Each structure stands twice: as C-alpha cells, then as structure tokens.
Image (cartoon, grey):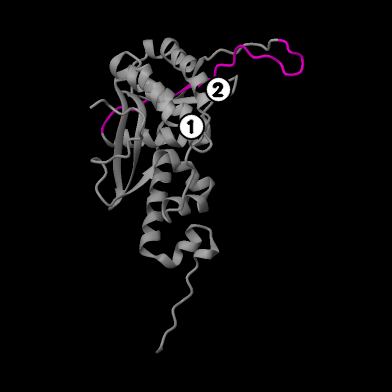
Amino acid sequence: MEKDYFSYNDGVGVIPEGSFRISASQISRFFDKTSEWYHEFLLGEKGFSGNTATELGNCVHAAAEMYAETKDIDRAALLSHVNSLAGKEDVDINIIKDQYPPMVEALVNQYLVRNVPTHTEEFIWKEVLPGIGVGGSCDAYDETTGTIIDYKTTSSKTPPTSFYRAYYFQLMTYAWVYREMGRPVNKLKLVYVTRNETGRVSEKTGKPLKDYPSIVHTVDHIVTESDFDIINGCIHTIANSVKLWNEQPELRFALAQDWRLYEKPKPRLFV
C-alpha cells in the first residue's frame, strides 16, 4: 500500500487512548481566542475545515515530505489528490492546479535540494499532566543542527521577515517536546513559499502586469532559555486549565469566558 502523504498524522499509536492533546498549532488560540478554543476543543463544536489556501498548503507540504523521503515528487499522486477535492466547500481546485506545480518546483530547487531534513512529519508527544499532553506532527526536524522547520505557503508577494506570534508558539511547542525527548534544539526555521503570480494582465489597461514567480524565503529564530521558559509556562497553563475544566465543571463558564456555560447551583433539600 502506498503511503498517504495528504492525511494529517493524528498521533494514533503515539498518544495513549483517552488522552487529551494540546495541539501545537493551536497554542496561540488559547490565549488570543479563548472562548473559541474551549468551544472547539472541549465542547466539540465544529471549527475551521479548510479552504483553497489550506488545501494548497497541504499539497506543498506533501511534496516536501515526498522529496525528503524519496528525492522525488509523485506528481500523479498530487494531481489525483487535487481532483479529489472537487466540490469541497470553499475550495477552488483550479487555483490549486495552477499554483502547486511552480510552488513545489520552487521549494525543491531553491531549498530542499540543499536542505534535506533528518526527520519529516514526525508525530511527537509529551504528557504534561495525567491524561493531558502536548504535541503534533512536525513538518521537518534536522537532528544534526537541532533545527525545527515549518513550511508555510503565502499569497504575499513579499514574504514576512519575522515570526508571527502563532508560528512562534507552534514551533516552540515542538522545540519543548523535542527537548523533553532529549533531542537537540537550537533553531526554529520558517520556510515560506510564495504563490506564482505570472502572466497576469491588468483588467483596466489590458497591459501585462509585473511577474512575481514563486520564491522561497526563510526566517530563522535562535532558541534561548527565555523562549523555553515562555513556552513551558504556556503549556502548563493550558494543561492545568483543561484539568480544571474536567474536575470542576462549575468553573467552565469562567474558563471559557462564556456565561452560557454557567451552571446554577442545584437546589438543596436540607441545610
């Protein structure tokens, strides 16, 4: 059976059955969108299910994993996957078909040919409190240099030059888990791949617009002890909040910042 490069690794076989996972990619949302975080991850309400941009990113991530493991790209598998998305809400497969080939070529030729990681899409996990842990599937990790790598696709013609808050928390969570596993961590690296904006024509003038072919841009962050102190505090705060949610339901309205979850005291027959 051929490997499925497109499905998310959810940690089956790594996470103990029944454990609650604090997702590395959602750490920042706990602090920035607290009520939304509780409703999605502890009340089971439906969250974001993807769109054209995320599915395009999934294709580029799959190609990166293919190349890291085989030094080749299975283009037939990529096309088959994109075609399978036809009819999915908020997904335009024509945009994906137009964009993923030049973006994949850019990622391979401008970055991966010289920077093949030692590990790719490795699911890592660390229990923080009994039945509560943190982890996720890390895009790439180079054990020889202690570098945690994350591939990001962007529609910006000028990719970012610094870490966004959410990406910092995500990669630092992987850094925390890897260090807890006894593996080296020295650097975080974002590898941005821009969309291919070529052959465009102005709707107003009918003249050709400037071309912006896909490029790869990297952003590095050297990890310090201060970084580990910050993420350690974040992880333990979330883990203990989940513990409170489970053990003291009367506090859920306060934890989730939602009065609708307030439970009125039950009537007492005797004092």
For the C terminus, give its image quadrant.
Answer: bottom left
Asked whether the viewer can see residue 216, the reply is yes
**Residue that lies at the very extreme toward the bottom in this rendered image:** 270
**Depicted 200 relative to depicted 164: above or below:** above
Q: Residues within 10 Å of mark 2 (few under 14, many from 20)?
A: few
Q: Amino acid at mark 2?
A: Thr
Q: Residues within 10 Å of mark 1 (few under 14, many from 20)?
A: some
Quarter that holds the N terminus:
top left
Residue at position x 50%, y 67% from top?
Answer: 262
Residue plotted at (31% across, 29% down): 4
In the image, 260 versus 131, the foreground residue is 260
Per the rendered image, the range of residues in magenta is 182-207
Q: Is residue 188 visible?
A: no
Q: Above or below — where is 38 with respect to 10? A: below
Tell me whether circle 2 and circle 1 mark residues in contact (CB < 8 Å).
Answer: no
Q: Which residue is mark 2?
A: 161
The residue where tag 1 is placed is 54
Residue 51, percent across and down?
51, 35
Can you give x and y, in whole percent of width and height, for residue 211 in the image?
62, 11
**Residue 176 appears left or right of 205:** left
Which label's residue is closer to the chain start, 2 or 1?
A: 1
Residue 141 image position (x, y, % from top left): 33, 25
- Depth check: 137 or 211 in front? 211
**10 on left or right of 172:** left
Q: Secondary structure at mark 1?
A: helix
Of tags 2 and 1, the one toward the viewer is 1
Residue in front for this viewpoint, 124 or 198:
198
**Image coords of residue 163 (percent x, y):** 51, 29
Q: Decide which of 119, 201 is in the foreground and name it.
A: 201
- In the picture shown, does residue 124 fall above or below 215? below
